[in-house]
Structures are given as C-alpha cells and as structure tokens.
Amino acid sequence: MRETYDTLLIARPAPEVLVVTLNRPQASNAMNTQMGLDLLDVFETMLADPSHCRAIVLTGAGEKAFCAGGDLKERNGMTDATWQAQHHIFERMVRAIIDCPMPVTAAVNGAAYGGGCEVALCCDFIYAARGVRFALPEVTLGIMPGAGGTQNLPRAVGERRAKELLLSGKPWSAEEAADWGMVNRVCEPSALLADAIAIAGTIADNAPISIRQAKRSIHHGLSLSLADGLLFEIEAYNRMIPTQDRREGVASFSEKRKPRFEGR
C-alpha cells in the first residue's frame, strides 16, 4: 500500500488502526476513476497482507459529504465502453472492501448518495453523524445501483423497505437508518470520527486472527443454511486452536493481565 494517493488521505491514529479518507471535498468526494483505483489498491493490499493493520475507518473529507456517488461530470460524454470500463473498476473495488479481512467502519460525516451510500453499505458497520442523509437515486438517472446497493441494502433493512427506497430514489436520514438497523450509531458530528476510531481501537486490541475468522464466519454464514453455517463456524473456530494468540488469551486471563496478541 502506498503512503500517498491522489484521492485519498491515509492516517494511523493508533498503530493498528488505519483511517482512509475520501479526499475530493471540492467535488463532494464524488467517486471518479482515480478514486476507484486508489480504493482498490488499498483494499486489495489489505486482502493480500492483513498484517498492515487490524481495523479500518473509512470517512470523507470536509463536513458536506461522505461521498456524493459517481462523478457525473467525469461521466458526462463517456462512451458506453468507457462507462463500462470505469464501472468494472468500481465493481472490483466493492468486492475488495467487502472481502477485506479486517473490520471496516464507515464514519459517514455527510451526505452518502448513490455510490457513496453503496460504499458505506459495503463496510462492516456504519457510524453516521446526526442529520446525515443517505440515498440511492440511480433510478432517477436512468440507471440502477450497481455497486452492491440492491444486495446490501435489503440485507440491512429488509426487502420491503429496500424496495421502497431503491425504487423511489428518495433520501432517508441517519436517524431513520439507525431505527431500521442500517446504521449502528448516530453520533454528534464533532464526535463522529473519534467514536469510529474508538470502536476500531477496541477491535484492534482483540486477537486479530479471531477477528478475521469471526468476520468470515458471519459474512459467509448468512448465505448458508443454519446447518451449513454451523459447519463453517467450526472450521473457522478450529483455525484458532493452534495459535499463539489462543494460548496468550488463556494465560492472560489466568494471570489477570491484559493480553498481548501478535496475530500468530
């Protein structure tokens, strides 16, 4: 993973916590081709080498927007082939975020429309600033959500409500999203990033192999029957038994001290 990107800011508020900031505030952090490539690089790097960090926070620069979706100014005048080529980058980016081994918290600081909403939904959970608005307005533009929106939103809020939101294109508030189960916590704007970093830090203090395996078990188990999900869980569980972290966890409990997990 590079230290600098054209459209992202990378920071480490704690040794094992990475904050990735969408950094096009002059364009409401709208997603252009370069941002898709930059996010793809970050999250494919995490997939290839989980030792880079133990938890990630994804947020937007400024107070106006988390991400306003695809950059329509860049897209205006694109040929069909160019549009599809760009979208292929976004498709790979979405899968990389979803497949990221370590937990990703979306800290939604402003409007999350279209692809911005979809990126937030790809994260493991969402903290949102009070008053933030979400929307998937693609049907009002002659397209439809194509970065996971039709799959992740129903899983978060249920099929019927997702159909209402997707087919109307109407926005909804952070408070409504929390009531529906899409947003985990509504924060005061001034506290949002600190709250998201705090939960990331709590996660990062836990055993990293355990966190990765538990995340995989939840994510993949939801697409399986209960019986198959239980089998998948046991396979994930068995990965922890021979680890040094498992031994350290038991030893630290017995010795009444904080464990020192090393991911081994």
Image (cartoon, grey):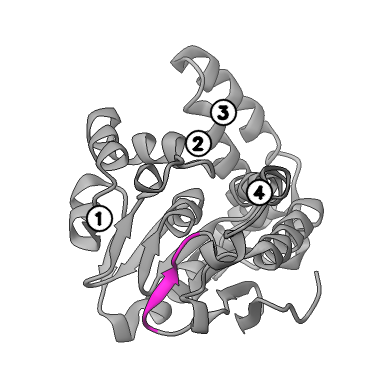
| 4 or 3: tag closer to the N-terminus | 4
| 2 or 4: tag closer to the N-terminus | 4
Q: How many residues crowd around disc 1 within 10 Å: few (fewer than 14), some, or many (20 or more)?
A: some
Q: Is residue 154 above or below residue 54?
A: above
> Can you identify the residue that label 1 sits on?
171
Type of the residue with mark 3: Glu
Identify the magenta region: 63-69
CA–CA distance in space, label 2 to label 4: 34 Å
CA–CA distance in space, label 4 to label 1: 25 Å
Q: How many residues crowd around disc 4 within 10 Å: few (fewer than 14), some, or many (20 or more)?
A: some
Q: Residue at x 33, y 67 (%)?
A: 128
Q: Quadrant of residue 43?
A: bottom right
Q: Is residue 230 above or below residue 166?
A: above
Residue 128 drawn in magenta = no
| 4 or 1: tag closer to the N-terminus | 4
Please identify, in this view, whether the residue under mark 2 or under mark 1 is nearer the observer.
1
> Can you identify the residue that label 4 sits on?
83
Please identify, in this view, whether the residue under mark 4 or under mark 3 is nearer the observer.
4
| 3 or 1: tag closer to the N-terminus | 1
